[in-house]
Amino acid sequence: MEAFIQYTVQGLAAGGFYALAALGLAIIFGALNVVNFAHGAFYMLGAVLTAVFLEFANLNFWVSLALVPVILFIFGVIVERLLVQWLLGLDILYTFLLTFGISLVLVDLVRMRFGVSGLPYDQPPGLTGSVHVGAIELPVYQVFVFGFSVLICLLVWLLLTKTRMGMVVRAATEEPERSRALGINVSRWITPVFGFGVAVAGIAGVLAAPFRAITATMGSNFIIILFAVVVIGGLGSILGSVVAGFLVGLVEAYGQGYASNFAQILIFILMAVVILVRPAGLFGRKETS
Amino acid sequence: MKTKNFRTLAIASMAVAALGLTSCAGGPPAAVKSELSNGKVVIGVLNDQTGVYRDLSGPNSVVAVQMAVDDYKKKYGDKAVAKNIEIISADHQNKPDVANTQAQQMYDRKDADIILDVPTSSAALAVAKVAAEKKKLFIDVGAATMELTGASCNPYTYHWAYNTKMLAKGAKGVVDNGGKKWVIIYPDYAFGQDMNKSFSEAVVAAGGSVIESIATPFPNDNFATFITRAAADNPDVIGIMAAGGDLVNFVKQYNQAGMRAKADLAVGLMFITDIHSLGVKEFAGTTFTDAWYWNYDAQNRAFADRFSKLTNGSRPTFAHAGNYSAATQYLEAVQRAGTDNPDKVRAQLDGLKVNDVFLRNGVIRSDHSVIHDTYVAKVKSEDQVKEPWDYENIIATIPADQAFPEVNPACTMK
Amino acid sequence: MFDVTGLYASYGQAAVLHDVSLSIKPGEVVTLVGRNGAGKTTLLRSIMGLHRDCRGAVTMEGKRIETFSPNQRAKAGLGWVPDNRGIYSSLTVAENLTLPPIVGKDAWSLNRVYDAFPALKERRSSMGTQLSGGEQQMLAIARVLRMGARLLLLDEPSEGLAPVIVQSIGRIIREAKEQGLAVLLVEQNVKFAATVADRHYLLAQGRVVEQLSNKDFQLREHELLEHLGM
């Protein structure tokens, strides 16, 4: 029983991080109808920038946590203006291929510059050691990642539901054409939303630096799990991807605890079951004509 | 008049000699009779040029082979049998099918006389098969599988640097130091399963016990629950058999969970590039078996210094040194045989007892497992590090005859 | 006040509208009647700038707007109520109402909207798609009134609704008319059209074949029903 509680807590902790990492993917899919395959590469850039800042500019974790999302926001805006916008009206496959290409280029650029073994990164000061949650001992950093991820998800949720900006973005997301006809300049929102999604990927990357290997390819496997999260949650649903993030974290933890070599397969079994029962995902909208 | 005639004669004879060199397959009378296929020796380096094993082998293995060629030419000069040596390289992307095609191309189209390196066990086995079919030489350096010198062994394939059982020998040192109770965590694919088996046997043989072996998906990012599970067994030692990025993921999360204080960490396979990428602080105190360390003695260091100049400051991994050694011993065998004919060259290699910068007390055994002294290494703590890449304390040397397992009877050399 | 002159529209090779011209004055309700596939919805979408494959002049209050983007046209005073009602499922009723920017000085206040549509007030914090079909239609119309649009483009507002609800939609259209708003109504329900409209355009195979006053329209109701295949 104690083990079960421990796995549950760890699953929730990991789930918070998955939710955050998948959030940007869901936002961008929702607003632009773009399956952003480069999301993993943006996450990787976040982590690599964090390591580079420490090594070459002596900027610590906290500075990176503030700075990296801003840089990635700008980077996302540039990518959207320069590349993505030209393919937005077309079939979803075009942007899928484009972002796939972008991810290959980014991964190879990082690999050329930093090799494949990755970059070192120390524990951020102030976040070392363990805390006791009841009878369970958890690394402070894991608790921090969980809390911070939940906080960001909550902020994004408030931004989307409680502000006029959020309302406009939701409307533009749901039905871009109709929103235009109701006097909303949808294009004006597209670029910052894309940048925002990239910035959230960057935050996940910064958080990953102290507990994941920082390599050019760190996002390439990760994005597969994130796609599973987004699909389970329902394409385009922000709330869905958050809930699915926790679900995937739990499934993974129980898998690791009780059926270790199935830990990852279980995630995809979950995905298959969800798709069979609810093709649009847990919180997905049904396709309307 | 007399001197002038003599000079003319000398020049003429030199010209004739030079012509003779190029026009007929003869050669200078002083050197051993040389018979080279295509008039040159072609060494193929087939490895991971872009993926996870790029840093530990990759382009720097080609550099190491080039160093061997340079040394050979310098040593023999005019007397060299192989005057014209070409190095070619290709990326096998760690995929057996790609390795298979690339190996065929190297042997058939690019006239490779030998293929070197080939990390990733499945890819190495694919190349060994091609080598046996084509009756061309293959020296594997980068892969760990026991199969190369087991049921899949063949007369044309050699396994130079290490294997999973040799890596597991280091476990004895850990058990002798009081690390009796082990939990092993291994990635669930060929390499990890092989490592788990080798380490479990070695731990038990040394008088320890393995409480639990935990299989993990591969690749895997999140090890939190696996670590909790391992910790619940209260082991003395946790052995991690993951490699590359997964190893780094594991060690970061292991340290974060505060496991350092609870159990010793033993790493199955680690390259110096892994320590370099994660930082010595995270690995400090970890023990592992190393096939070679660049800062072990003056000879190694001299080699490493040359290597550094050619690679923008990198220090060689044992795989790089192993490739240097394999290329050197191959060229020496060609020199002795006077030809690059594979059957004559392997007659020179088989049973060879040899010492070089990589092989200490090296023997090329009948099963083509190349045994040599290996080392139990402990990662230095941060304050012990005196220069970049200075990461290891060698705490014990395992003599060649104890470092490797017995000849596998399944190997019949057919 | 609002004129369409010589409008042609097509889908690739297939021409859908040929030389369509119509005009509407403030306070006038004009219907567009025709069979399915006559091009009615395409005409509305072309007017809104949503159907790109078209040419011809569109004038709103003396301003040429055919080069405007859809959101600029909305800001010029065009209020579109699409045939699927266009309620956002991720927005509450109140959010659906307040989403569009206010584009005219005669825009209805939220209180006026709630007075006119008490059902919407009651359910203002429900999600838009939890409303019944009739309520959704009310919401869609209320939305453009609240926006302050001066030309309402209604695409089959009575479709699939109970007679009592159709009546109240008629009431709202008349209220808008009294306020001086212009309404372009696409309808297949000839009876309903006759109760609210001043004039009618008959659209067949992408052309305006006839223009009728409401009186003539009512006299020829049976003939028209036959002609329209309704």
Image (cartoon, coloured by chain):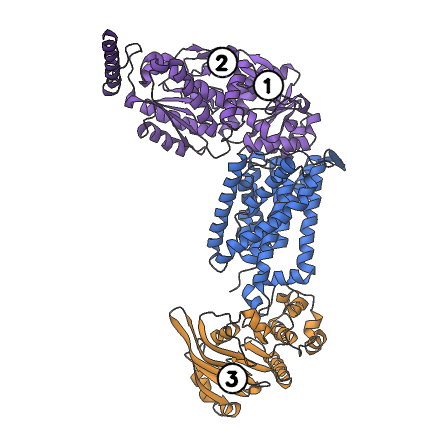
Instruction: Answer above or below: position of C31 versus B232.
Output: below
Label for residue B377?
Answer: 1
Distance Cα–Cα, label 2 vs label 3: 97 Å
**Chain B tint as drawn:** purple
Distance Cα–Cα, label 1 vs label 3: 90 Å
Q: Quadrant of the N terminus of chain C?
A: bottom right
Label for residue B372?
Answer: 2
**Residue at image point 48% right, 51% down:** A98
Image-based side of B268 in relation to B12, left or right: right
Q: Amino acid at mark 1?
A: Ala
Relative image position of residue A17 (x, y in whole percent): 64, 44
**Picture quarter containing residue A124?**
top right
Distance Cα–Cα, label 1 vs label 2: 16 Å
To the question of a shared chain for discs 1 and 2, the answer is yes
Instruction: Answer above or below: position of A20 versus C121.
Output: above
Relative image position of residue B198 (x, y in whole percent): 53, 21
Q: Looking at the image, do the residues carrying marks 1 and 3 touch, with CB atoms under 8 Å apart?
A: no
Say which of marks 2 and 3 sits in front: 3
Q: Amino acid at mark 3?
A: Ser
Q: Nearer the viewer, residue B72 or B326?
A: B72
Relative image position of residue A11 (x, y in whole percent): 65, 41
Q: Nearer the viewer, residue A154 or B52?
A: B52
Instruction: Answer above or below: position of B182 versus A48.
Output: above
**Chain A tint as drawn:** blue
Chain containing mark 2: B
The chain letter corresponding to orange is C
Instruction: Answer above or below: position of A247 versus C15.
Output: above
**Residue at image point 60% right, 47% down:** A201
SS at mark 2 in the image: loop
Please give the residue where the numbered disc 3 appears in the rendered image.
Answer: C23
Say if residue C72 shows up in the picture.
Answer: yes
Q: Nearer the viewer, residue B300 or A4?
A: B300
